[in-house]
Amino acid sequence: MVDSVAAARETSVKAHSALLGFHKHRHEQLLAQQHRQEQMQQLQQQQRQQAPQRQGSGPHDPPSGPGPSSSQQGFGALGPGRPSFRPPQPPQQSAAGLGSGSAPAAAPGPQPGNGQQPAFGPEGQLVLPEPLAMLDPKIVDNVFNEVLDRSAAIRWEDIAGQEAAKALVQEMVVWPIMNPQLFRGARAPPKGLLLFGPPGTGKTLIGKAVAANISATFFSISASSLTSKWIGEGEKMVRALFALAGVLQPSVIFIDEIDSLMTQRKAEGEHEASRRMKTEMLVQMDGCDPGSGERRLLVIGATNRPEELDEAARRRLPKQLYIPLPCAAARKVMLMNAFKRGSEVATALSDADIDKIVERTAGYSGSDMKNLIQEACQGPVRDLFRTRGNVTDVAPSDLRPVQLRDFQMASKAQKRSVSDTEVERQYAPVA
Ligand SMILES: Nc1ncnc2c1ncn2[C@@H]1O[C@H](COP(=O)(O)OP(=O)(O)OP(=O)(O)O)[C@@H](O)[C@H]1O
Ligand SMILES: [Mg+2]
């Protein structure tokens, strides 16, 4: 059983890398062939003029066009009039291999477009779907490099506690991607999900677990990097992000620290570029529909300051999930995980010691617990340094095991970072 899980995990990691490798390769081709694309754009322009009916809900929508042009038909149509393609699956894995961990392996639903090869033009150039061909390649490059998530695999079981949140996220994200046909009409999943709660409770971790456990393309963006790193380009980045996510659907767009991007719009004093970016984001979020055959994008936002979020953005993330401070059982799991069999750090903690630590860490966040454990584990090293004067030739086996007193010392340095009053006033959902 353990072996098969490990094997599935390895396949999943390989598949993920292969997929990412493919994206990179395809993008390099895109840049190299860009001048040829100009011709293609002209052709598309002409076709659009002949059939000017357009989809989309606002002036900034990525052009979705009337349907695949003759040269694009190789991508297959994903829903009426929407050119799209799926990256080919690497030979050693099925699409289901991308799902892993405790979540069941996720197979993309039986929708047209899945598993199709990208199309190549008469001169062997890669033909991109229209929404990408219309964008500035440098911006698309940024999205590829900075936003398409390549983070380490986080398993659902790595997240201690938060059972309700984990269950709901799987229900909302994993199931509809496994079988989109089931989740249509009145059963369609909400367009967006907002994770909110005190700092350090695992919101970003949940985002990473989603990335590692679904067979969808995962885009992860920190809103503060959108505002600071790509000053002035934010609007274009947002457009490229959603266009790319649309092409590689089903996709999940995880926007961390969404409050810093979608703060309430101020009447004055707000930078024009940032206002435009927000508007673009709202327009794009409007067009997401994880249950549709046309634009299967789910947006997940995370924030620890939900009250700062623009009301319009909040409406576009209709499912709002509170991620609380970890309960006693969750804190115990964090401790047990840190010192489980095979762990690098030896411990002499009895069950009673563990219970005592759990009791005394009431109100600690997951991140406080992590820091506390780290600090306690330094105890044996500090002791040894005191007697020997250096740690150069010390083997791990020379260190004494971590004891309760290490935690007592550590708790002086690492106290809980959020008080009950703060939790109640700033972070908890309004009753
Ligand atoms: N439930 C949890 N289980 C295991 N580790 C956790 C948990 N919650 C937090 N942690 C630890 O704390 C670190 C920080 O968590 P994370 O970044 O997910 O918090 P966050 O809720 O996104 O915080 P913020 O609101 O400040 O962005 C994680 O990398 C992890 O080590
Ligand atoms: Mg976070």
Image (spheres, rainbow, N blue to C red):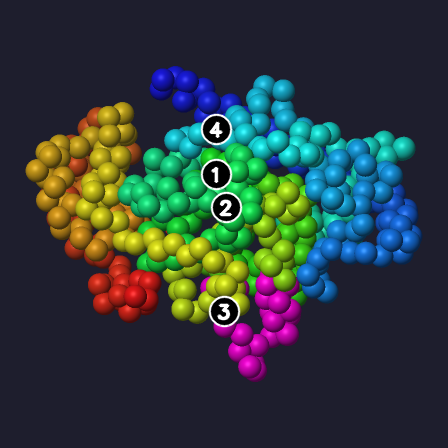
Residue type at numbered disc 3: Asp
Label 4 Cα crowd, 10 Å radius (few <14 / some 14-19 / many 20+): many
Tell me the SS state at disc 3: loop
Residue type at numbered disc 1: Val
Q: Earlier in the sequence, mark 2 or mark 3?
A: 2
Magenta stretch contains residue 271: yes
Residue type at numbered disc 2: Arg
Which image quadrant for residue 58? bottom right
Tell me the SS state at disc 2: helix
Q: Which residue in the protein does label 1 denote?
A: 174
Q: Earlier in the sequence, mark 4 or mark 3?
A: 4
Residue 108 coordinates in the image, percent (x, y): 57, 32
Which dot, 2 or 3, sits closer to the camera? 2
Give the magenta-colored segment's residue range: 259-282
Magenta stretch contains residue 276: yes
Residue type at numbered disc 4: Ala
Looking at the image, which is closer to me, 374 or 282? 282
Label 3 Cα crowd, 10 Å radius (few <14 / some 14-19 / many 20+): some
Give the residue displayed 46% in from the left and 67% down from the top.
Answer: 309
Give the residue displayed 17% in from the left and 36% down from the top.
Answer: 402
Say if mark 1 contacts mark 4, CB within 8 Å: no
Say if mark 2 contacts mark 3, CB within 8 Å: no
Q: Which residue in the protein does label 3 denote?
A: 310
Gap in Å between the C-alphas at discs 4 and 3? 36 Å
**Looking at this rendering, what residue extends furthest in the left direction?**
352
Looking at the image, which is closer to me, 17 or 320? 320
Residue 109 visible in this rendered orientation of the protein:
yes
Q: Which of the numbered marks, if any, corresponds to residue 187?
A: 2
Q: Which residue in the protein does label 4 denote?
A: 105
Which dot, 1 or 3, sits closer to the camera? 1
Q: Which of marks 1 and 2 is nearer the N terminus?
A: 1
Q: Earlier in the sequence, mark 1 or mark 3?
A: 1
